[in-house]
Image (cartoon, helix red, strand yellow):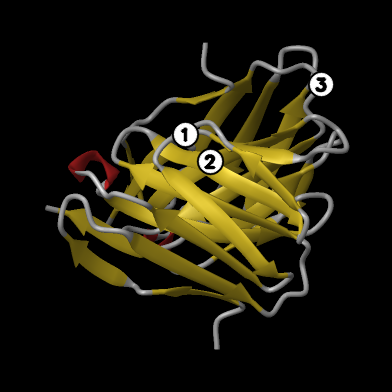
Amino acid sequence: DADVTQTPRNRITKTGKRIMLECSQTKGHDRMYWYRQDPGLGLRLIYYSFDVKDINKGEISDGYSVSRQAQAKFSLSLESAIPNQTALYFCATSDSPPRAFFGQGTRLTVV
Amino acid sequence: RKEVEQDPGPFNVPEGATVAFNCTYSNSASQSFFWYRQDCRKEPKLLMSVYSSGNEDGRFTAQLNRASQYISLLIRDSKLSDSATYLCVVASNFGNEKLTFGTGTRLTIIP
């Protein structure tokens, strides 16, 4: 079983719909991250959390929200999906010094 | 200027050759450095950390030059299985270690 698990792995949704991407980890790390990856733009940080009570915006947080339900769970929501949110989304955890461990990714398509 | 910059490539290299990539970073306060490998449509995976004195792991050698603010990755005796995208990663802000990814360098090893 993967140490960092993302669900769903693939999702097609319509413009304006609310969607939640979930992430759970068994590595026992406090730090968790959500990234999106687009061709030519690399990985961009959406939100990150250093513990259950800590939530921080990344470089591209507009249009997204997160919830850290427990040390092991960090979910990403798109309140009203739009087509330019079509991307590959990765959840990651890290220890210190910050070596990141990624989930397998969620391929999201907004039509 | 991007925080982390890499030559996107592609680098097309014959099997058995030696290949080197560089990556520059803009924040002189950066504390931790890594190389990740990402296969097509897969999650990034940690290849190696980069230490100040340089470090080696089998056919892979990583170097850090703090004065010039760049890190490098050298792959010797390249294998077909080395074909992937290599991501340079920098952690800035000591005590608030947020990872910043380069856009990656694509490497193809040719038989």
Q: Can residue B41 be seen in this view?
A: no
Quarter of the figure with the C terminus of chain B: bottom left
In the image, residue A36 above or below residue A67:
above
Residues at marks 3 and 2, CA–CA distance in whole angstroms: 19 Å
Residue type beneath disc 3: Ala
**Mark number for residue A45?**
2
**Mark number for residue A60?**
1
In the image, residue A102 above or below residue A1:
above
Residue at which label 3 appears? B29
In the image, residue B77 above or below residue A69:
above
Classify mark 1: residues with Cα within 10 Å, few (<14), some (14-19) or many (20+): few
Q: Do the residues labelled 2 and 1 touch (CB within 8 Å)?
A: yes
The chain identifier of the residue carrying mark 2 reads A
Residue drawn at 11 percent across, 53 percent down = A111
Across and down, in percent, residue A2 comes to 55, 81
Residue drawn at 32 percent across, 41 percent down = A38
Q: Is mark 1 on a helix, strand or loop?
A: loop
Residues at marks 2 and 1, CA–CA distance in whole angstroms: 6 Å
Residue type beneath disc 1: Ile
Judging depth in this view, the residue of B102 and B108 nearest the camera is B102
Across and down, in percent, residue A32 comes to 66, 58
Residue type beneath disc 2: Leu
On whether disc 3 and disc 1 are found on a single subunit, the reply is: no
